[in-house]
Image (cartoon, helix red, strand yellow):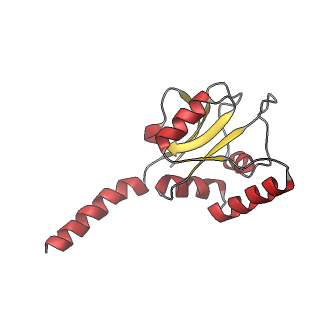
């Protein structure tokens, strides 16, 4: 019975994380105020390298598998493996550099806030006033 109660408690704790919102965030100086799924996909697949004002895009991705990363990748319609293949091809051809991979939401917020032109994604609850929210994914 204790095991069953423990399992039920673990499931209850996991459910809010599965329903948590994800925020696509950018440096406050970025020239756009909102982003679509297709525009985010173009940025994360490195086919869009500049913002509308011509400043370079700097992409930060998350290292760990989890609800936030899964929800973001579903939003842009790409799988992690698909993007890794794209990034590898771009690096090997000399056309660009893969996004910087960081380990936590807090680190993404810190890197995006301190890097002009930066974009990333975090659990919406972690987005601070130090960054601009371009999209919220439910």
Q: Give x and y (percent) for residue 127.
A: 49, 35
Q: Give coordinates of residue 55: x percent, y percent.
A: 78, 30
Q: Is 48 left, or right, of 67 in this rendering?
A: right
Image height check: is 64 above or below 48?
below
Residues 80 and 11: in front is 80
As drawn, 122 above or below 31: below
Residue furthest left as drawn: 1
130 or 101: nearer the viewer: 101
Q: Residue at coordinates 43% horizontally, 50% vertically from top-left?
A: 20
Above or below residue 92? Residue 115 is: above
**Rendering coords of residue 86 (x, y %):** 76, 59
Answer with left or right where residue 51 lies relative to residue 127: right
Q: How many marks?
A: 0
Residue at 18% over, 68% down: 5
Left or right position of 91 against 80: right
Give the image location of residue 89, x and y in percent.
Answer: 80, 59
- 28 left or right, relative to 12: right
Q: Quadrant of the N terminus?
A: bottom left
| Residue lying at 48% horizontally and 57% vertically, measured from the top left | 66
The quadrant where residue 35 appears = top right
Residue toward you, 58 or 137: 58
């Amino acid at each position: 019975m204790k095991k069953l109660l423990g399992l039920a408690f673990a499931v209850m704790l996991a459910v809010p994380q599965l329903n948590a919102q994800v925020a696509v965030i950018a440096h406050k100086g970025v020239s756009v105020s909102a982003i679509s799924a297709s525009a985010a996909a173009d940025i994360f697949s490195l086919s869009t390298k500049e913002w509308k004002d011509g400043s370079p895009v700097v992409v930060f991705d998350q290292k760990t598998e989890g609800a936030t990363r899964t929800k973001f990748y579903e939003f842009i319609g790409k799988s992690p493996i698909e993007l890794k293949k794209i990034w590898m091809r771009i690096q090997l051809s000399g056309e660009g550099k893969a996004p910087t991979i960081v380990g936590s939401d807090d680190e993404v917020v810190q890197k995006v806030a301190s890097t002009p032109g930066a974009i990333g994604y975090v659990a919406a609850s972690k987005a601070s006033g130090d960054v601009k929210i371009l999209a919220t994914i439910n």
